[in-house]
Image: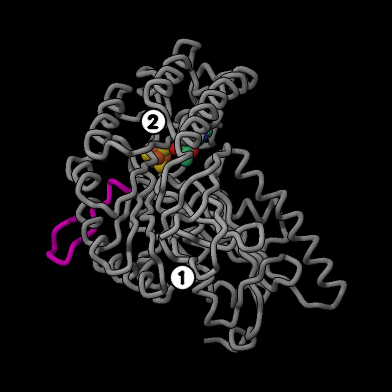
């Protein structure tokens, strides 16, 4: 360890996370990697010696947010300097770092470190270099496995945790930057995943959400030397004492295998809720997106899921205004949503991403048409979500309490369907799964009371 690293005792790091759950997981791992250097986590940029923006590149809006946030970080740094409170190192991590590299420092010269998502285990070394005044850009895909290099310690005390088991994507949907920013698909070995899951369970984690950009394509090496599927991994995770709930995200319809449907049927720990993006309802657009499935194949996947687990609720991702999308194509998307019925959904206007095939396609859809379609779609999705939430009133749901609520004496937890549930409950109930009678439904959350024993 260098002298500079020794002198960092009692420093503070502020990590701001943008984008998906994978980044949330990575931010925790960065915090873990920094703890041995004396960095404690801070809730504010104003007292941070190190600010890390863990960024998202999926749509233009997400990527641009980084630059406005960097403006605020630079001002905070100047205030600290003027007040004689010390200096602030500024790091940009995640997918914008990976995609833009050096360009970030050109646009925002205040940035000291640019580090791609595959290199977080190198943070201590990169900080040492930046501390000596060097501008550091680290966006290679290193040989070594970043998971193996990271500290073997759980950062979380929350009863619900993410566990990344698979990263990267080989699907190359024509709109998507992920295969470029996160690289080729990689599955962590089974033993490594199980060891991390056991540690999390020891720390009081009751619910695991297994993460991957294309998580149901998981094929990690098992202890038997064979590749294990996600279903097989789920069976092994379900056996860990303390792990009472399992989820996985995000999935591709093409990788919904028979053993995974069977796991939904056979494992009570698997929550009856699945996020399964379909992106578009028109086969013509699905082909241009290189999704490699049709709308009917998606319908069949949903039928099989419902056959395996009749109470399953669904969530999805949808893009409107992909190049060439006609009114009829958009209507096919609306029709699919009406047929299936979603408990929740994310919907986006197509955003042209440099370097992706769709960015080069003719027939880009005008912004106002995209916006109209988005509003139409979102009205339908909001109606479905509201109806789903309303259907919970009067039912008793097992709720995993996660944290104290907004009001004193209140806790917030999650239903099996991932709805936030607000309940009057004693603080000791955090980390427990308790039967709650749902009394009220809102657009985004539920209220309930604990059932008397
Ligand atoms: N434009 C709009 N939405 C996109 N997504 C991915 N790339 C784009 C893009 N270029 C959406 C997809 C994906 C979700 C994570 O983000 O719906 O499933
Ligand atoms: Fe992107 Fe498609 Fe891979 Fe999902 S499956 S990460 S949308 S390329």
Residue 318 shows up from this direction: yes
Residue depicted at x 66% and y 70%: 42
State whether the magenta stretch is mostly helix, strand or loop.
loop
Q: Quadrant of residue 293?
A: top left
Number of marks drawn: 2
Q: Residue at label 2?
A: 278
Q: Nearer the viewer, residue 301 or 343?
A: 343
Residue depicted at x 35% and y 19%: 283
Label 2 sits on a secondary structure element that is: loop
Question: Could you say where residue 360 lies in the image, as x and y percent from the top left?
Answer: 50, 26
Describe residue 280's horizontal placement relative to residue 296 as left or right. Answer: right
> Which residues fall within the magenta stretch?
215-228
Q: How crowded is mark 1: few (under 14 residues within 10 Å), some or many (20 or more)?
A: many
Whichever of labels 2 and 1 marks the residue nearer the N terminus, that label is: 1
Is the residue 214 above or below the residue 160 in the image? above
Q: Nearer the viewer, residue 92 or 296?
A: 296
Q: Residue at label 1?
A: 121
Tell me if residue 270 is in the magenta stretch.
no
Residue furthest out toward the front: 452
Q: Nearer the viewer, residue 75 or 212?
A: 212
Residue furthest out toward the top: 328
């Amino acid at each position: 360890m260098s002298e500079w690293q020794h002198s960092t005792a009692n420093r503070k790091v502020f990590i701001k996370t943008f984008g998906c759950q994978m980044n949330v997981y990575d931010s925790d791992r960065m915090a873990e990697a920094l703890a041995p250097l004396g960095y404690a986590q801070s809730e504010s940029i104003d007292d941070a010696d190190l600010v890390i923006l863990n960024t998202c590149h999926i749509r233009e809006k997400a990527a641009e947010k980084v630059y406005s946030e960097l403006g605020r970080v630079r001002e905070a740094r100047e205030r600290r300097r003027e007040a004689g409170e010390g200096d602030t190192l500024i790091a940009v991590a995640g997918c914008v770092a990976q995609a833009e590299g050096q360009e970030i420092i050109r646009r925002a010269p205040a940035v000291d470190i640019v580090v791609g998502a595959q290199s977080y285990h190198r943070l201590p070394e990169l900080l040492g270099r930046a501390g000596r005044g060097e501008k550091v850009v680290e966006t290679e895909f290193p040989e070594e496995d970043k998971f193996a290099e990271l500290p073997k310690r759980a950062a979380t005390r929350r009863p619900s945790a993410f566990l990344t088991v698979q990263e990267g994507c080989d699907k190359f949907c024509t709109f998507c930057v992920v295969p470029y920013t996160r690289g080729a698909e990689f599955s962590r070995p089974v033993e490594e995943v199980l060891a991390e899951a056991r540690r999390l369970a020891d720390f009081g984690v009751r619910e695991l959400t297994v993460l991957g950009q294309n998580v149901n394509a998981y094929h990690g090496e098992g202890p038997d030397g064979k590749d294990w599927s996600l279903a097989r991994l789920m069976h092994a995770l379900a056996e860990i004492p303390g792990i009472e709930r399992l989820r996985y995200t995000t999935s591709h319809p093409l990788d919904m295998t028979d053993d995974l449907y069977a796991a939904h049927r056979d494992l009570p720990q698997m929550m009856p809720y699945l996020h399964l993006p379909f992106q578009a309802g028109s086969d013509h657009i699905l082909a241009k997106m290189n999704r490699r499935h049709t709308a009917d194949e998606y319908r069949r996947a949903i039928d099989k899921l419902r056959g395996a687990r009749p109470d399953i609720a669904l969530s999805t991702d949808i893009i409107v205004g992909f190049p060439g999308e006609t009114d009829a194509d958009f209507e096919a998307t609306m029709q699919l949503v009406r047929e299936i019925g979603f408990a929740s959904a994310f919907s986006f206007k197509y955003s042209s991403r440099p370097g992706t095939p769709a960015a080069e396609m003719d027939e880009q859809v005008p912004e106002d048409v995209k916006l109209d379609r988005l509003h139409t779609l979102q009205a339908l999705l909001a109606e479905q979500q509201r109806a789903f939430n309303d259907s919970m009133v009067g039912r008793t749901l097992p709720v995993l309490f996660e944290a104290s609520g907004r009001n004193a004496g209140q806790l917030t937890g999650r239903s099996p369907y991932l709805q936030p549930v607000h309940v009057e409950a004693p603080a000791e109930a955090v980390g427990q799964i308790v039967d709650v009678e749902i009394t009220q439904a809102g657009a985004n959350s539920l209220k309930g009371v604990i059932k008397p024993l």
